[in-house]
Image (spheres, rainbow, N blue to C red):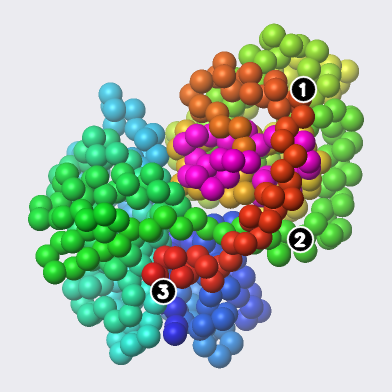
Amino acid sequence: MRILTCSNSCPRWDGGVLAPRSPGGLAPMLVALLEQHGGHWIFTAPPDRPDAPDTVRIGEDVFLHPIEPGEDLRRKHYDEISIRLLLGLLHYMHDTSAQPVFDDALWAAWAGYEEVNRTYAKRLAELAAGGEDTLVLLNDPHLMLVPEFFTAEQPVRGKLTYFLGTPWCEPDYFALIPRRIRVRLLTSLLRCDVVGFHATRWADAFLRCCARYVPGAVVDGRSVRLGGHRTELVATPFPLDTATIDRMTGEAAMKRWRTRLARWSHGRRIMLRADRLDLWKNLPRGFRAYELLLERRPELAAECWFAAVVTTPSRAAGRHRAHAEETEEIVHRINTRFATGGREAVSLIRPAADDDSRHCVLAGLSMSDAAVVNSTYDGLNLFAKEAAYLLPDDATLLLSENAGVIEGLGRFAVGIDPFDLTATAEAMEAALTRPGSSLRSERRAALREETVAGWVKGVFGL
């Protein structure tokens, strides 16, 4: 068996060593799979390696294929369509009074999305020729037309799986994009043998979209038949790499972060969150909920510290920048109103590098009384899994009911409505003033049972 994979996510390969560029998501699993089975990884060249060769060989049987689309196509494919249109759609982020607008500029961007997807598919078809035992794994909303172009050029041998780490929206909202696009995206994905999501609710929404919008599609249980082809739908969330977390907890960087966070907390109880500043992570509402709590219980500012580890998207758009500015304004207002004795009530922590950020988050979780995930909609949310694994006994995980991970962690968490600030404030108060459930050993045992091999078996139906 070998792996052929396409993703927008990309690795590092300095010194001939393959490594994930970021600690979470699909990239670490792709690294592990390729190192075990060998194969090819096609990805968009990172901005810091625009002159990378067409093929990079790692060891005996791992081949990397960076694709450099150029800045104009990056803007059209990535910024305009993949991020603003499609991720905005799947996360319910469009203001429907004004968005989206399919004018000449957006249709030109759509043509760029098609071109990049066609380039990926062409390279994939070249690599797939003659591969009888190949598992083809496609990922990210950035590449949803690749199955259409790929299967037109190359008969699929082995299994073709598309995995979406995002939510999927309901049919009425999916209709925000024109019929010719929505039908084409769905039909392209239905050329795959398997379409996977992190949660059942996202797979169900996809099935409902197929039933409503794809002519001739027949939904049959957890599958869709279109013509003579059947596509299976699976809900298989990413596993947590508990072995790596266990290793990191003993590293010097963890000890340094524990010391630093203990100094900043001044002995107060800690409530932690960790997010990239994406719109759906919902940081402003989370901080406003805490502000409501402090308005009722101002003494808690002297007893508790709300720490947020934040990172910035690699290509932040206008709405992302406005979102970040709003977040900073709310934090500044809370500290102006409630900081005591020179100690911030709320802090934004921005570690310098991805690895340093991971150590900061894991160190913070190991010493926190509560963790908060209040995403408006989230495909999974790996931070919630890290929290369930590392939070001490009697600590509380506050978890958005719209995060895909709640399907697996709901029994270990307190569910919150991400749009209800008053209820969120009440949940924060309970988490910071009363002991949570003592299920740490059960939480850790459940997460240790998850493996990359199990995820691969689930998404390929092996």
Query: Which residues, given as a range, are shown in magenta?
Result: 386-412
Where the C terminus falls, by quadrant?
Answer: bottom left
- The amino acid pointed to by label 3 is Leu
Residue depicted at x 62% and y 19%: 425
Tell me the tag on residue 433: 1
Residue 4: horizontal and vertical position, in percent? 41, 77
**Drawn side of residue 30 relative to residue 184, left or right:** right
- The amino acid pointed to by label 2 is Asp
* Number of the front mark, 1 or 2: 1
159 or 260: nearer the eye? 159
- Structural distance between the alpha carbons of marks 2 and 3: 29 Å
Q: Secondary structure at mark 1?
A: helix
Q: Is residue 400 magenta?
A: yes
Q: Residues within 10 Å of mark 1 (few under 14, many from 20)?
A: few
Residue 115: horizontal and vertical position, in percent? 26, 62
The residue tagged 2 is 246
Query: Label 3 near label 2: C-beta < 8 Å?
Result: no
Q: Residues within 10 Å of mark 3 (few under 14, many from 20)?
A: few
* Number of the front mark, 2 or 3: 3
Please report whichever mark, 3 or 1, sits nearer to the chain's N-terminal start. Answer: 1
Work out whether 450 lies above or below 307.
Answer: below
The residue tagged 3 is 462
Work out whether 147 lies above or below 268.
Answer: below
Q: Quadrant of residue 306?
A: top right
**Drawn side of residue 66 relative to residue 437, left or right:** left
